[in-house]
């Protein structure tokens, strides 16, 4: 029965109970809508063992001028004769070679075992990663700028073009250190001379994937950010800088370039030892701590195979830097890598977890609140509070 004196403000208890289902469904729809939008965030592209290489190609890697590469490079199925301009020096094991232009190792399919198998797997993984990136559906943006993205600010998501993409002026990629960008380019990718891809807000080059069906060309003295997965060739013109990886299903051509993958770390997080056994690398000592602040580029700087004081696993760049039975793991969501045993759990995107007697701590609460999931939860709580407030108002005015 409706109270006539308060016709528009009150309802009977039975009527409200009947309507509770409606309120609940409204709340559920709103919450699921927000969560579904959150779940649309793109997962990263798994590079597999191709991620062990800064430059990887199937038909050759060439350079002229004074190129500087930080990381490993390799070719397969073509042999080492297709690696030109590097002045290669064969290691005594015949499994890899070195070059004054490469801070890392150089691999080819004709080197001693197990290199041929390693290189074949890496090339297959490169193809799988390309297929993964190209196969992502439901893009957030299609044909943005008709292929001209110069001057734009690109937020996280999946971008698709049925044409080529040009960058005639600086472009900004803005997002957090855990956000992912995937750019699907059906034609060529070209950045003009002296132009830059600029990272903002903590965006990481390791989370930016340029899937290019045609040729990727980085203009003279340009600065480019991200991992290039090219179905054809990657050409880096004179003096250009690539912060990322060049993974080509044909050839990579360099000319006095700087190629590396730099991880821009958040504020230094202390790694505090809690003691206990340290696995294959030795044990930590209670009360000791290790800070990585002394390393200017922890992604590419290794300590050989020595252990930091109070920490069980040395940092690394590739699996080759680790002992037998260990792998080089990205343990902090892109901040740096550590040699870990197969039984060791890795730390991915969280800032608080254990690594055999060591604990990484961080402000997880604030990061969660700033995340999309945190925002969805806050919206859901807000809707629930509105419902409860309405319930209270109705009965207070009966």
Image (cartoon, rainbow, N blue to C red):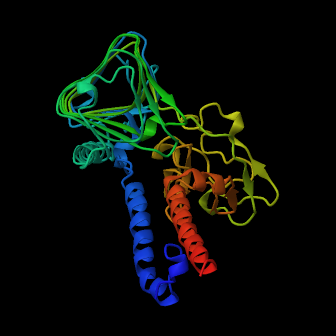
Q: Is residue 215 visible?
A: no
Q: Is residue 315 visible?
A: yes
Quarter of the figure that contains the C terminus:
bottom right
Residue 307 rendering spot, x and y as whole percentages:
67, 48
Say left or right for 143 vs 267: left
Which of the two residues, 97 or 5, is positioned nearer the viewer here?
A: 5
Q: Residue at (49%, 29%) from the top-left corner? A: 199
The extreme front residue here reads 5
Residue 259 rendering spot, x and y as whole percentages:
43, 24
Which of the two residues, 74 or 366, is positioned nearer the viewer here?
A: 366
Q: Residue at (33%, 47%) from the top-left corner? A: 114
Say left or right for 140 vs 286: left
Is residue 390 depicted above or below 213 in this figure?
A: below
Is residue 33 depicted above or below 211 in this figure?
A: below
Residue 371 rendering spot, x and y as whole percentages:
53, 52
Q: Quadrant of residue 220?
A: top left
Residue 68 rendering spot, x and y as whole percentages:
46, 19
Is residue 250 depicted above or below 315 in this figure?
A: above
Which of the two residues, 241 or 338, is positioned nearer the viewer here?
A: 241
Which of the two residues, 197 or 18, is positioned nearer the viewer here?
A: 18
Q: Residue at (40%, 74%) from the top-left corner? A: 25
């Amino acid at each position: 029965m409706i109270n006539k004196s308060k016709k528009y403000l009150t309802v009977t208890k039975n009527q409200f109970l009947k309507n509770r289902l409606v309120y609940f469904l409204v709340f559920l729809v709103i919450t699921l809508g927000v969560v579904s939008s959150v779940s649309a965030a793109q997962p990263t592209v798994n590079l597999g063992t191709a991620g062990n290489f800064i430059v990887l190609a199937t038909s050759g890697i060439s350079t002229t001028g004074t190129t500087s590469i930080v990381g490993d490079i390799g070719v397969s199925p073509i042999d080492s004769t297709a690696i030109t301009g590097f002045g290669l020096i064969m290691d005594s094991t015949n499994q890899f070679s070195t070059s004054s232009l490469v801070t890392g190792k150089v691999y080819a399919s004709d080197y001693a075992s197990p290199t041929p198998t390693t290189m074949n797997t890496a090339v297959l993984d490169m193809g799988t990663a390309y297929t993964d990136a190209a196969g992502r559906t439901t893009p957030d943006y299609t044909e943005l700028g008709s292929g001209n993205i110069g001057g734009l600010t690109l937020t996280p998501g999946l971008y698709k073009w049925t044409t080529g993409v040009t960058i005639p002026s600086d472009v900004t990629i803005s997002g957090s250190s855990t956000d992912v960008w995937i750019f699907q380019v059906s034609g060529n990718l070209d950045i003009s001379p002296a132009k830059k891809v600029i990272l903002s807000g903590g965006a990481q080059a390791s989370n930016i994937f340029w899937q290019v069906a045609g040729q990727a060309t980085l203009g003279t003295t340009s600065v480019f950010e991200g991992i290039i997965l090219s179905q054809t060739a990657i050409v880096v013109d004179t003096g250009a800088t690539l912060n990322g990886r060049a993974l080509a299903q044909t050839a990579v051509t360099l000319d006095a370039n700087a190629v590396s993958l730099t991880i821009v770390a958040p504020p230094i997080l202390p790694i505090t030892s809690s003691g206990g056994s340290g696995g294959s690398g030795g044990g930590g000592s209670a009360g000791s701590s290790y800070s990585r602040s002394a390393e200017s580029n922890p992604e590419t700087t290794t300590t050989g195979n020595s252990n930091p004081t109070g920490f069980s696993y040395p940092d690394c760049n590739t699996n080759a830097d680790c002992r037998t039975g260990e792998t080089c793991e990205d343990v902090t969501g892109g901040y740096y890598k550590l040699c870990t045993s197969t039984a060791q759990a890795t730390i991915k995107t969280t800032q608080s977890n254990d690594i055999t007697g060591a604990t990484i701590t961080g402000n997880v609460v604030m990061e969660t609140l700033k995340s999309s999931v945190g925002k969805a939860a806050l919206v859901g709580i807000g809707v629930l509070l509105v419902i409860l407030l309405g319930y209270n108002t109705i009965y207070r005015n009966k």
